[in-house]
Amino acid sequence: MAIRAIRQLVRAFEVTEGAGVTVHRTIGTPALRNLDPFLMLDHFGSNDPDEYIAGFPPHPHRGFITFTYMLDGHMEHQDSMGNRGDLRSGGAQWMKAASGVIHSEMPKQTDGLMRGFQLWINLPAAQKMSDPAYQEFSPEAIPEVRQGPVRVRLLSGRYAGQRGVIEDPNTDMHYLDVTLEPGAEFALPLAGDYAAFVYVYEGGASSGGSELPQHSLAVLGAGDEIAVAAGPQGARFICVAGKPIGEAVVQHGPFVMNTRAEIELAFREYQSGQLVKKKAAMTGG
Ligand code: FE
């Protein structure tokens, strides 16, 4: 198998989002505008119990999916579909904004800690104005695969004969949260045309002899297998991959469409209270 080498290393860009929340952004920055089909990756967190976390008060989205994975702490969620959720540590939330959703996301600490990821996944043009949908998964619903020094929480995709809980048929997304003991090795066979990246959030790792520094995103190049080895302190990382959509991306803030005119329409509709077209029920496990 040809191992996918690191094609680009993207250092996180610190941005202030919502009401005073600091996030480390890698995809969706000048260094990496997007990585088709992925539009944005934010790593948010706080380990200061006194830090004021105001969260993300009501804001709109249209044209894509937001996928949130909580590592520590929890996140209270409310949206224009009528859903109310409380995403716990180790749980995940998949929200297809599609034609339009207005929601609030309010992260809270547990024992002084709050950490997680939000990934934006694009939708093909034919589905951008489809009905929104929402799924929330408890930590217990997410399959965990343990093979000696390798532990994988399988949020989406296939690994070691198992399937993750979140299905994205457009991109066949793989989303794995991997914990490696010191020196352990992780491998994932993957079709050559899939976009793929690794983001190390704890410890240190390497791939094909190149370092994967903490809080940097490694875009992986061509090949048919992802291979990551942990350093002497072990490593925790997310490994994400998906089939590119291959369409024009016109992004403005919370709206991601295919043309400028569609973005202008989204702004006009939001300003006149017409953004939300459809309510939907909450499902999930
Ligand atoms: Fe949001």
Image (cartoon, rainbow, N blue to C red):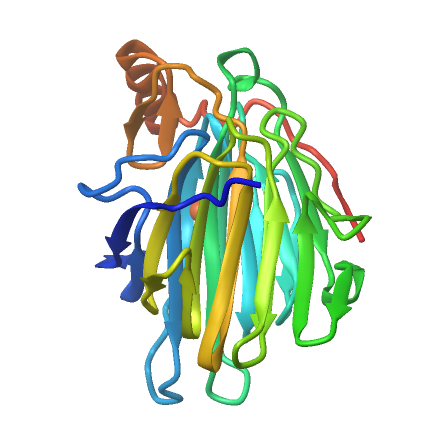
19 vs 88, left or right, is left
Q: Is residue 149 above or below residue 112?
A: above
* Residue plotted at (75% across, 48% down): 165
x and y, in percent, of residue 268 in the image: 32, 20
* Residue plotted at (80% across, 53% down): 285
Near-viewer residue (77 or 27): 27
* Residue plotted at (30% across, 51% down): 26
Q: Quadrant of residue 71?
A: bottom right
Farthest front residue?
1
Near-viewer residue (263 or 103): 263
Q: Is residue 94 above or below residue 265?
A: below
x and y, in percent, of residue 156 in the image: 67, 46
x and y, in percent, of residue 238 in the image: 51, 58
Q: Is residue 236 above or below residue 104?
A: below
> Is residue 184 in sight in this rendering?
yes
Near-viewer residue (10 or 27): 10
* Residue plotted at (37% across, 68% down): 54
x and y, in percent, of residue 230 in the image: 49, 72
11 vs 132, left or right, is left
> Is residue 108 in sight in this rendering?
no
Q: Is residue 241 above or below residue 86?
A: above
Q: Work out which quarter of the rendered image holds the N terminus and state it.
A: top right
Near-viewer residue (239 or 61): 239
Number of on-image labels: 0
Farthest left residue?
30
